[in-house]
């Protein structure tokens, strides 16, 4: 519903991400409200894994949000490029997402659109933290326990790959619905595809509602079977059967991967120079520091 530009803040001379509501939606009240609420929600949750919002408003009839520009990839692009990720990298991404989500849930907000395209993966601060992950796009966020199916206009856009069964059924959603989506994302980062893939939308909705998730360890023999159990719980059809929090889910995951994972070092997945191809209005390039030696070349060690 939006277009995101890499732009220059002329007052402070910094690079920002400028998100504009697409012109075809500017006359639609539901989309305008959703867009306006997105900036308020993101700004209200002050968390290191949620993109800082600098400013939002309307100029010349165009709704905009100016936010911190994350030099890196969104997780969709990263997975398309890399395929399944090394276990330690997948865990690092999952735990940062879980932390952001739990912070939103503590404020009684449900993100409701957790998917790889809404996860930004930037360069981390050092070799112990090779990536910094941001959860973005709070356009669909709602107070928990609100009753929402896909009934209202413009309610559902995009993919059904990550959607929790209770949302499909129009039952109340809470933080555990985001946990389900997070588990779908984790499954995809490790297996290369989300847990349920079906020929058409109806079959996919049916699968989320009724089919048991496939065992991840079948696709990834380097991952112990205990991980299947953890994912099965986070992907439970009934929210009460899931973990209480996203961080609890990721802690269980970390415990289950054993040797495959938690302390293993992998180089950063992000080469910030890729985004340096993004030209600024005056023709200059965005200034992105060269990656440290351990990040270059981007290596895959344990696939
Ligand atoms: N702060 C940011 N820094 C860099 N890229 C961003 C940023 N925010 C969004 N993007 C890019 O724009 C894409 C769409 O942004 P998103 O907020 O998810 O909009 P939409 O509502 O269209 O899904 C993201 O997948 C990401 O590639
Ligand atoms: Mg998005």
Image (cartoon, grey):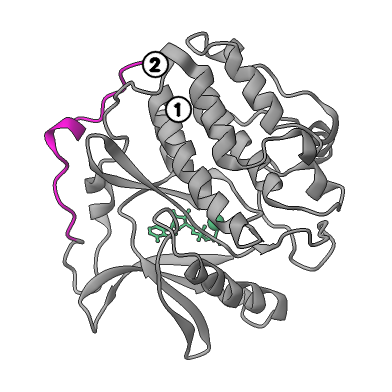
Mark 1, other Cα within 10 Å: few <14 / some 14–19 / many ≥20: some
- Quarter, ligand 2: bottom right
Residue closer to the observer: 211 or 285:
211
Q: Main secondary structure of the magenta part?
A: loop
Give the residue number, with chain letter if any, for mark 1: 83
The residue indicated by pointer 2 is 303
Residue at (28, 38) in percent of width and height: 130
Of residues 247 and 231, which is closer to you in this image?
247
Q: Position of residue 16 (x, y in %)?
A: 32, 69
x and y percentages locating residue 280 in the rendered image: 24, 68
Tell whether 209 sits left or right of 286: right
Cα gap from disc 2 to disc 1, whole angstroms = 10 Å
Residue occupying the point 21% across, 61% down: 286
Q: Is residue 37 left or right of residue 167?
A: left
Q: Residue furthest top?
A: 221
Q: Residue furthest bottom?
A: 60
Residue range of the region highlighted in magenta in the rendering: 287-303
């Amino acid at each position: 519903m939006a277009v995101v530009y890499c732009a220059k803040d002329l007052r402070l001379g910094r690079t920002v991400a400028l998100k504009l509501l697409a012109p075809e939606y500017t006359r639609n009240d539901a989309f305008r409200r959703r867009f306006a609420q997105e900036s308020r929600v993101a700004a209200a949750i002050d968390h290191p894994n949620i993109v800082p919002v600098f400013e939002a408003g309307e100029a010349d009839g165009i709704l905009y949000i100016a936010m911190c520009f994350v030099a890196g990839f969104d997780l969709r692009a990263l997975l398309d490029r890399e395929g399944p990720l090394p276990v330690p990298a997948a865990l690092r991404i999952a735990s940062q997402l879980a932390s952001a989500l739990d912070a939103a849930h503590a404020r009684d907000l449900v993100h409701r659109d957790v998917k790889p395209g809404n996860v930004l993966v930037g360069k981390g601060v050092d070799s112990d933290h090779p990536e910094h992950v941001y959860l973005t796009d709070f356009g669909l966020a709602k107070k928990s326990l609100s009753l929402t199916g896909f009934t209202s206009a413009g309610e559902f856009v995009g993919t059904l790959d990550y959607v929790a069964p209770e949302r499909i059924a129009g039952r109340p959603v809470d933080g555990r619905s985001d946990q389900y989506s997070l588990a779908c994302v984790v499954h995809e980062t490790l297996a290369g595809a989300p847990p349920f893939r079906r020929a058409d939308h109806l079959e996919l909705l049916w699968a989320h509602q009724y089919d048991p998730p496939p065992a991840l360890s079948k696709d990834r023999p380097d991952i112990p079977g205990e991980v299947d159990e953890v994912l099965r719980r986070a992907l439970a059809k009934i929210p009460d059967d899931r973990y209480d929090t996203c961080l609890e889910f990721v802690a269980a995951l970390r415990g289950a991967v054993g040797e495959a994972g938690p302390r293993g070092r992998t180089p950063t997945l992000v080469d910030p120079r890729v985004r340096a191809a993004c030209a600024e209005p005056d023709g200059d390039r965005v200034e992105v520091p060269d990656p440290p030696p351990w990040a270059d070349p981007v290596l895959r060690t344990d696939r």
